[in-house]
Image (spheres, rainbow, N blue to C red):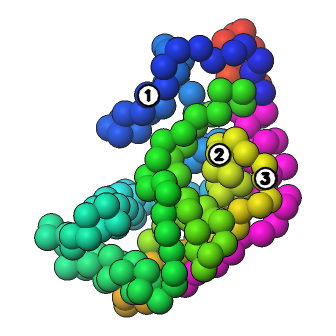
Amino acid sequence: TETMPLTGDFSFERDPHRYTVGTTVVPSVTLIVRAGGGFDRKWFKAEYLERGTAVHAATMQYDLTGDHPTDLPADWQPYFDAYVRFLSEVPCKWTMIEQPKVHRGHRFAGTIDRYGTVQRASAILEIKTGYAAPWHGVQLAGQDILLNKARHVRKRLAVYLRKDGRYQLREHDDPGDYLRFMSALTDYWQARKEQADGR
């Protein structure tokens, strides 16, 4: 990865979705995974992104205040209901909720959906309104690295919320995900350097 140290204050703008340190824009975990070819783009339709953003906002509001959303479209309400059902059936305790983080050494950033304990085990949790995909494990590995602590001591989990109000909780435990993420990060910064050099 790029070796120049990041200096300055860390900030995150939700719209546009942008992370900066000082005057330097740093890539997100999602951008790194996408640049590494991990995404199947057929799942990234505007409506899916809009739905995911809305459901994330609703679940964050619920976790912070206990309030149910009043403005979710009827078609998206079951995804929120699935999250409430998940919390009622699986013991969880959050210490981070939608928390932006930066890794100054590796020069990338991201937002941790949830961090805390799930069934009394330390865990990172991703909230998804789609189906499981291989790149989710790589995304979670990047988030684990973002926490800047010893790796492999936390579970990397994703809860997949369904349109029928049900959910699936899945652990992503392939240790190779860490290498895949760091390889994609290295490739990203190499491409940025070559672009800056005019190659």
Residue at 48% across, 63% down: 94
Residue 62 vs 96, above or below: the answer is below
**Pointer 3 or 1: first along the chain:** 1
Q: Which mark is residue 147?
A: 2
- Report, in whole angstroms, how far the alpha carbon at label 3 lies from the one at label 2: 9 Å
- Disc 1: which residue: 11
**Pointer 1 or 2: first along the chain:** 1
- Report, in whole angstroms, how far the alpha carbon at label 1 lies from the one at label 2: 16 Å
| Picture quadrant of residue 39 | bottom right
- Disc 3: which residue: 151
Secondary element at image label 3: loop
Part of the protein shown in magenta? 167-188
Q: In the visual, does 48 lie left or right of 65? A: right
Which percent across, then down, holds residue 93? Answer: 49, 69
| Picture quadrant of residue 57 | bottom left
Residue at 63% across, 70% down: 157
